[in-house]
Image: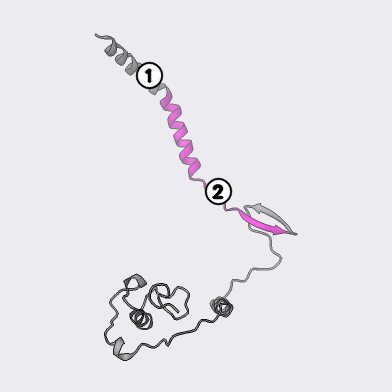
Amino acid sequence: MNTCARYSALFVRIGHKTMRNISLPLYAFAALVSIASGVHAAPINKCVINGSVTYQQEPCPSTQARKDPTLEELNAAERKRRAEAASSRAPLPREASTVPTAVSGSFRCDGRKYCSQMTSCAESKYFLAHCPGVKMDGDNDGIPCEEQWCRP
């Protein structure tokens, strides 16, 4: 038997003995980890109490019952937010948003929805006015594809 084979056989015997000796603690550790991973930490709540910030697992104390907003209240708040955002923007001169009927007859909704798929301002206006699901008016001002086709 050559030297390499002797060391190889010795290493294999030591490896098997070592594995047998550490297998029980290894299995115990694996079981402990699997049990511990099943326990999830409670979410942390950030509470402001008397002006000081605290972090706790329990819900923040409240002096009055919490009332969830109704759908109507949420919609009203969203309309108000949009109206304020629209009024804060500087008014832009608008082009006529109607597409001539002669031109609109040459377009049809075919699934395109991005400005990069359009070939003209008239086409993008037609798609914005007539086709569902288009994504051509990012600022919701009624003018589609302002950077590519319909520059003010």
The residue that disc 1 covers is: 17
Query: Crowding near pointer 1: few (<14 within 10 Å), some, many (20+)?
Result: few
**Furthest-right residue in this view:** 50
Q: Which of 131 and 35 is in front in this view?
A: 131
Residue at 44% x, 29% y: name it.
Answer: 26
Q: Which residue is drawn at 29% across and 90% down?
A: 102
Please tell me whether residue 34 belongs to the stretch shown in magenta: yes
Secondary element at image label 2: loop
- Start and end of the magenta stretch? 22-49
Q: How is the image coloured?
A: one colour
| Amino acid type shown at disc 1 | Lys
Q: Residue 41 carries which label?
A: 2
- Residue pictured at 28% horizontal, 77% vertical: 110
Residue at point 43%, 24% (across, down): 22
Callout 2: few (<14), some (14-19), or many (20+) C-alpha neighbours within 10 Å? few
State the SS at label 1.
helix
Residue 63 location (% of width, % of height) = 71, 65
* The C terminus sits in image quarter: bottom left
- Does residue 134 belong to the magenta stretch? no
Q: Is residue 111 above or below residue 31?
A: below
